[in-house]
Image (cartoon, rainbow, N blue to C red):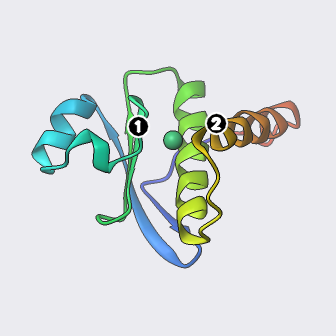
Amino acid sequence: MKIPKKIIILGIPYKVKLVNSMTKTLKELDITEEEGDKQAIGYVLCKNSMILIDRKTSQETQESTFIHEILEVINDSLELNLVHRNISSLEASLYQVLKDNKLLRS
Ligand SMILES: [Zn+2]
């Protein structure tokens, strides 16, 4: 999968940024880690309409994290109130389906 620089989720455009240091980037954006998604490798900043993904992980992890952050946005937008464990299960399942059916072309 080619992770795009921008993605529209339910009508709202989000910037997607691959970052070298999550901690540093969050600090630069003046965001405390609690405000974002509590995943060291991925963050969704709803206020800033931005998804951050750690560049220093494998391509697979980046792709899976990208899906995870999309699910976070959907969960938030539709007020699904999924607990984080559910989001992670959906992430892993959806990623596996896409991968097993060779839908993750780069
Ligand atoms: Zn999460």
Q: Residue furthest right?
A: 101
Measure how far apart labels 2 and 1 are at the Cα level: 12 Å
Mark 1 and mark 2 in contact (Cβ < 8 Å)? no
Q: Camera-side residue: 21 or 75?
A: 75
Residue at 58%, 41% (x, y): give it.
Answer: 84
Please name the residue that numbered disc 1 is placed on. Answer: 38
Q: Where does the image place residue 83, in percent across and percent down from the top left?
A: 61, 46
Residue 77 horizontal side relative to residue 93, left or right? left
In the rendered view, tell whether residue 31 sits above or below residue 56: below
- Is the residue indicated by label 2 positioned so its CB lies within 8 Å of ligand 1? no
Residue at coordinates 79% horizontally, 36% vertically from top-left?
93
Of residues 16 and 65, which is closer to you in this image? 65
- Quadrant of image for the C terminus: top right
Residue found at x 19% / y 49%: 31
Q: Position of residue 36 (x, y in %)?
A: 34, 47
Q: Nearer the viewer, residue 68 or 102?
A: 68
Query: Would residue 5 be found to the left or right of residue 47 on screen?
Result: right
In the image, taking residue 97 as reference, residue 69 lies left or right, namely left
Q: Secondary structure at mark 1?
A: loop
Q: Is residue 43 above or below residue 39?
A: below
Q: Position of residue 34 (x, y in %)?
A: 30, 43
Q: Is residue 84 left or right of residue 38?
A: right
Asked whether residue 98 appears in the rendered view, the answer is yes
Residue tagged 2: 85
What type is the residue that disc 2 sits on?
A: Arg
Choose top left, top right, bottom left or bottom right for residue 23.
top left
Mark 1 C-beta to ligand 1 under 8 Å: yes
Q: Which residue occupies 71% across, 39% down?
A: 105
Q: Position of residue 87 (x, y in %)?
A: 64, 44
Outermost residue to the bottom: 11
